[in-house]
Image (spheres, rainbow, N blue to C red):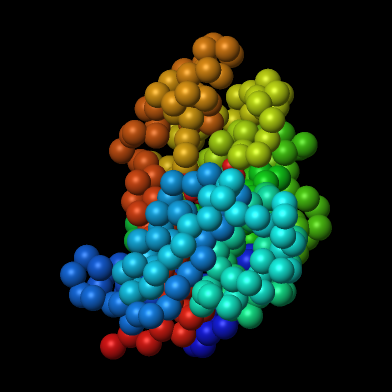
Amino acid sequence: MNLQGRDFLTLLDYSPKEIEYLLQLAAELKAKKKAGIAHDVLRGKNVALIFEKTSTRTRCSFEVAAHDLGMGSTYLDPTGSQIGKKESIADTAQVLSGMFEGIEYRGYGQEIVQQLAQYAAVPVWNGLTNEYHPTQILADFLTIQEHFGHLQGLKFVYMGDARYNMGNSLMIGCAKMGLDFVACAPKAYHPAPALVQTCRELAAQSGGSVTLTEDTDAVAGADVVYTDVWVSMGEPTQVWVERIDALAAYQVNAALMQKAKPTAIFMHCLPAYHDHNTAVGKEMGEKFHRDAMEVTDEVFNGAQSVVFQEAENRMHTIKAVMAATLGAQFK
Ligand code: CP
Ligand code: NVA
């Protein structure tokens, strides 16, 4: 498998075999890290990390992974770059290509990361856009594989706003890898018909399926129950009221988990509003008289939750993406 020179913008661009390869490489790199075996085979290289939105996991994953691979990294924060404001995406891509071997971009429209990739002479990695979050899916799938030993045939239920980056990317990933994907949300929060159609065609080849429903009983028999925040980065705070109104019935709580298989796991890309221990969680929780938003604290911190293993796997999988696309050769 040779992925050298490839961009990583959406899982739509990667075949099931290539995704499988990245997951395998991530597992190997994780084992090396745990065993204390150095794997800094990309010494002398450097990567640029552009963040137009904030981050904890993705930024730390790229920085630690780059360091473990022997690379230097430069972080450009949401206020610290000229990108799009005083300098075009095309010019930025060409400037950075002269100094770095790879570029990560987190920001708004998918067209921005696509344009960056078009003009950059080096691999570009999508660290989250409004539409997609492909590196997150690799971490989620590595976690599922570690837990169940396989992906194929598992029932994966996504609760909540399925129109955005997480719903879209999980649907694509599940369709490619043969999982039975269910988006459970009010109709207005279902993914766009064109992407659903594409994913149904992919699922027909992989043995998976794509189901959209408003009925929370669809959680019956689930192996994985997944949710994401109801209000994403970059959205105005005014949308909280309509989201709570529409999505409260789709909260992941103990009663909902009871409907899934007893062996089911709970997943969340994080950050999560499961209590009042965050500024936004407290403000919105008090305003709308709620202890939690998309997931209760009981489920989040419960025995079925794998959210912190999932968060750690961001680093191992992002390392695999950089290593593969930069042509790293491990002994
Ligand atoms: N899951 C995720 O992307 O987290 P960050 O926003 O902290 O990077
Ligand atoms: N949908 C969330 C995902 C965060 C990882 C957001 O875009 O803010």
Asked if one can make out residue 187 in the rendered structure from this viewpoint, the answer is yes
- 273 and 124: which is toward the camera: 124
Image check: 327 left or right of 330?
A: right
Depicted 225 relative to depicted 101: above or below = above
Residue beneath the point at 48% across and 30% down: 273
Query: Residue at (57%, 12%) from the top-left corner?
Result: 287
Q: Is residue 83 left or right of residue 301?
A: right
Tell me residue 62's x, y (percent): 43, 61
Assign the C terminus to one quadrant of the image.
bottom left
Q: Between 122 and 132, which is closer to the camera in this rendering?
A: 122
224 or 279: nearer the viewer: 279
The image shows residue 45 at horizontal and vertical percentages of: 42, 78
Q: Position of residue 2 (x, y in %)?
A: 51, 88
Residue at x-position 45% and y-position 73%: 46
Viewer-proximal residue, 79 or 282?
A: 79
Q: Residue furthest right?
A: 194
